[in-house]
Image (tube, rainbow, N blue to C red):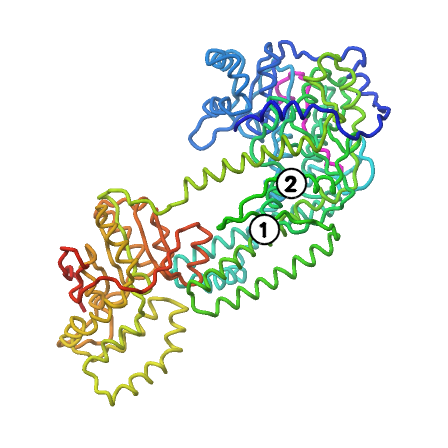
């Protein structure tokens, strides 16, 4: 990330335009003992520090300050192994991140290596039961946690409660007596109004019993998900949506649905249990229980404990440089969604305080608290918040966002226009949520209506808009659910202890290591520091995503180890099996017999449609029965004559051009059809190979049965794997072109899948997976009767294995 400009940093230090009057700090006995107002300490000396959460946003900033400002410290970091990457390697990667850039520049490569060898140690483990801890620890900073508001209940408890329990049990076992700074959150007080004091929480919930219940929740929900009636629901829904992909696809999606159901129930379980106990969500509930674990296990055992509660942590105001941030934080998804026009309204209270605090202020408090420990056996509490001393009302936050995105509008996806910044009216939570539900119902009805029509370019464009609208509404619904407690809060977090600690710092150092929130000019912070940082990060992420997924229209790479697979009907030709059959039957059929043949075909259409909806293979079998009794010689003669002319006229020029591009790039081109291959033989000259089915015959007459199952959906996927293995083709670099939802199962095996004139379901999946979608239309294609591309010297031939 590029650091903010010096101008922005200088501007961020201007005094606030409007400050709340200074208030007299009411300081607890524990804080009075921890902080001597005349001489607050600032140096950690030669302390051995144990840091959890060092790879996270806040933990990185803490580690950077320890390295840059406390050179005498030794730091042991709790880092888990990630995949095959050991913790030591993760530490080296961590030190290359932007937060350490100024420190790296100052000490040089040699200084970084010296720090790794002499000052930094790694304890490889995750949260939970810990290995033996060093016995010479002087300070523990516990900042590790999950910050997800809607994690499954067992995961949230395991990380936040189990992590704290494992840490304090390991400390007690070690026999050491370090000062502990336990990082929590201001929102641990639960659902309430009024002033939240810097004090121990007043609940009497048995956190151990809740932890045990949460750990067993997954077992109970998993058992419920495996009951026959529940499994039947998953199977039926999966078959309705994915039946055309094949039985294994049905089973896979049914199991995925079961897993999603389990996760959704555990998320709801956590949210509901939190609300039933008076907390906003499972995150704040588990953070509250972690505090109680710290109090009971550590402070009550006669040790020193300080609890630091930050509000919503966002980008740095000053240190390590203005605007430093690592990934999107709590408020940032809302900011970006607004800029993209996805939040036309939001259920916030205009006069509620959105309590935001820059990350460097939180770090400074943590280290000041660490240097001024609480007395043994009595915990001290510090809330790092802005709402009491420099409040930011929700309507002011909105004005800042609107001002920024009016001056810096985001581009409208797929056009040269820009998003117009919405104006929020703050009509109230109930009205917003009611309007959201109505909009979702309207969009669902439109989606159902569009699904009834044949997929074409116009309807696909309409469906794409419906899908985007659906995603936007789901996003707004999720935000409304997740952030309701934070944008409608009527809590004011008292910060008397924190202000007293800041006042006790040496005056000459307060600009550097202080945390006076009244010095923050919110307008300047958002317009010149935070919003530009978020947008710079957005552009970086967008570039990275584009670079990895945008296939563009670049020339195809020259390779001989890739294959390009083309489906026939709807992809290379704009005809279906019924039209092909009519072309075959019309050759030599008496005019007087035509009406009967046509009526017979029309009468069978409902049967064909039902079969097509259920299973592509079933449809092909049912339809090809109509060839029963046709002499093989006659079919071959028809295909080489008028049928071939008709098929060539219906071949899509864009398909022909794409096939030529693949062949010129050295790719092996294969036409694959679930129907009988002889019907595709007029196009054989375009491809290296044509693969399809053959029909059973007796005495030169077709019986109406296939010689083997049709090559569709999962059967085609199995064939493709075998074909690639036998030919030495790299599927991750190969190409595929299909038009039907039934093609999804084999297209997803390829590194470069494309949907050509896709049906509704394939179009929806292609958009979701960001596959390329082509709209190929009929026109002059330059094909001659014998299947040769005009101007090509490639002879027409029917490869071995193509027949009836």
* Left or right side of 431 for 792: left
Q: Taking 544 as reference, is 690 left or right?
A: left
Q: Residue at x 51, y 37 (%)?
A: 539
Q: Judge by depth and name the residue closer to the eye, 634 or 458.
A: 458
**Where does the image place residue 803, in percent across and percent down from the top left?**
17, 66
Q: Residue at x 65, y 43 (%)?
A: 213
Depth check, front residue: 460 or 178? 460
Q: Residue at x 47, y 52 (%)?
A: 768
Q: Which residue: 68% across, 51% down?
A: 345
- Of mark 2 and mark 1, the one earlier in the sequence is 2
- In which quarter of the view is residue 339 placed? top right
Q: Which quadrant is the C terminus positioned in?
A: bottom left
Q: Position of residue 163 (x, y in %)?
A: 61, 31
- Seen in the picture, residue 738 relative to 668 is either above or below; the reply is below
The answer to whether one can see residue 546 in this image is yes
Residue that carries the numbered disc 2 in the rendered image: 212
- Residue 755 in the image, given as x and y percentages of width and height: 37, 56
> Can residue 169 be seen?
no
Q: Quadrant of residue 188?
A: top right
Of helix, strand and loop, which one carries label 1? helix
User: Was residue 595 drawn as part of the magenta stretch in this picture?
Assistant: no
The mark closer to the camera, 2 or 1, is 1
Indicate yes or no whether the magenta region holds residue 175. Answer: yes
- Which contiguous range is marked in magenta? 171-189
| Secondary structure of the residue carrying numbered label 2 | helix
Q: Which residue is mark 1?
A: 264
Residue in the foreground of this view, choosing between 364 and 620: 364
Res. 589 mark: none
């Amino acid at each position: 990330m590029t650091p903010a400009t010096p101008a922005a940093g200088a501007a961020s230090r201007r005094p606030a335009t409007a400050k709340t009057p200074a208030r007299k700090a009411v300081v607890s006995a524990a804080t009075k003992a921890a902080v001597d107002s005349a001489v607050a300490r600032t140096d950690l000396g030669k302390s051995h520090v144990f840091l959890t959460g060092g790879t996270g946003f806040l933990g990185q900033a803490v580690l950077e300050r320890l390295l840059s400002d406390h050179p005498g410290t030794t730091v042991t970091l709790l880092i888990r192994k990630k995949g095959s990457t050991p913790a030591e390697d993760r530490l080296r990667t961590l030190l290359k991140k932007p937060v350490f850039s100024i420190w790296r520049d100052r000490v040089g490569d040699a200084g970084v290596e010296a720090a790794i060898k002499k000052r930094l140690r790694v304890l490889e483990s995750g949260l939970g039961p810990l290995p033996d801890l060093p016995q010479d620890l002087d300070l523990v900073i516990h900042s590790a946690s999950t910050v997800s508001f809607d994690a499954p209940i067992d995961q949230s408890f395991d990380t936040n409660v189990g992590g704290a329990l494992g840490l304090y049990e390991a400390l007690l076992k070690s026999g050491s007596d370090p000062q502990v700074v336990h990082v929590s959150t201001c929102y641990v007080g639960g659902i309430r109004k009024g002033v939240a004091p810097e004090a121990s929480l007043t609940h009497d919930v048995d956190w151990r019993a809740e932890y045990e219940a949460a750990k067993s929740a997954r077992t109970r929900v998993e058992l419920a998900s495996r009951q026959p009636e529940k499994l039947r629901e998953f199977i039926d829904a999966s078959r309705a949506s994915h039946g055309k992909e094949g039985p294994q696809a049905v089973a896979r999606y049914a199991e995925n649905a079961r897993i999603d159901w389990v996760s959704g129930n555990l998320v709801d379980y956590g949210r509901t249990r939190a609300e039933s106990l008076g907390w906003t969500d499972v995150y704040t509930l588990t953070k509250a229980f972690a505090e109680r674990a710290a109090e009971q296990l550590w402070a009550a055992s006669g040790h020193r404990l300080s609890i630091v509660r930050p509000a919503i942590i966002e980008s740095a105001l000053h240190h390590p440089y203005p605007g430093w941030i690592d990934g999107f934080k709590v408020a940032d998804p809302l900011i970006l969604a607004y800029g993209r026009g996805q939040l036309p309204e939001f259920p916030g209270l205009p006069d509620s305080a959105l309590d935001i605090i820059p990350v460097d202020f939180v770090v400074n408090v943590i280290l000041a608290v660490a240097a001024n420990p609480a007395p043994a056996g009595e915990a001290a509490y510090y809330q790092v918040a802005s709402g009491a001393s420099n409040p930011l009302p929700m309507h002011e936050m909105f004005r800042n966002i609107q001002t920024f995105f009016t001056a810096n509008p985001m581009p409208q996806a797929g056009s040269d226009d820009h998003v117009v910044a919405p104006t929020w009216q703050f009509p109230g939570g109930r009205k917003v949520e009611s309007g959201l539900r109505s909009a979702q119902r309207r969009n669902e009805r439109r989606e159902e209506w569009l699904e009834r029509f044949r997929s074409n370019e116009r309807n696909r464009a309409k469906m794409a808009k419906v899908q985007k609208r659906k995603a936007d509404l789901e996003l707004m619904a999720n935000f409304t659910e997740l952030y309701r407690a934070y944008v409608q809060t009527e809590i004011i977090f008292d910060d008397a202890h924190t202000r007293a600690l800041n006042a006790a710092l040496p005056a000459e150092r307060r600009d550097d290591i202080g945390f006076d929130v009244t010095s923050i000019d919110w307008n300047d912070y958002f317009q010149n520091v935070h919003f530009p940082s978020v947008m710079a990060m957005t552009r970086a992420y967008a570039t990275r995503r584009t670079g990895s997924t945008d296939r563009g229209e670049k020339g195809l790479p020259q390779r001989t180890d890739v294959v390009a697979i083309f489906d026939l009907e709807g992809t290379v030709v704009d005809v279906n099996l019924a039209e092909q059959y009519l072309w075959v039957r019309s050759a030599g059929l008496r005019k007087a017999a035509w009406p009967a043949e046509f009526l017979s075909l029309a009468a069978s259409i409902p049967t064909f449609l039902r079969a097509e909806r259920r299973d592509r293979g079933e449809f092909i079998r049912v339809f090809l029965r109509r060839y029963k009794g046709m002499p093989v010689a006659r079919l071959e003669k028809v295909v080489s004559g008028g049928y071939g002319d008709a098929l060539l006229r219906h071949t899509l020029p864009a398909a022909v051009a794409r096939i030529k591009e693949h062949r010129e790039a050295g790719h092996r081109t294969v036409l694959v059809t679930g129907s009988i291959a002889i019907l595709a033989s007029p196009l054989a000259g375009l491809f290296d190979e044509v693969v399809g089915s053959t029909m059973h015959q007796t005495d030169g007459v077709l019986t109406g049965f296939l010689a083997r199952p049709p090559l569709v959906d999962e059967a085609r996927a199995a064939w493709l794997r075998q074909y690639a293995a036998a030919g030495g083709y790299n599927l991750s670099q190969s190409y595929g072109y299909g038009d039907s939802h039934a093609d999804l199962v084999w297209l997803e095996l390829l590194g470069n899948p494309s949907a050509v004139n896709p049906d509704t379901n394939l179009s929806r999946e292609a958009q979701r997976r960001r596959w390329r979608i082509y709209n190929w239309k009929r026109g002059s294609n330059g094909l001659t009767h014998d299947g040769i591309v005009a101007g090509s010297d490639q002879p027409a031939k029917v490869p071995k294995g193509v027949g009836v």
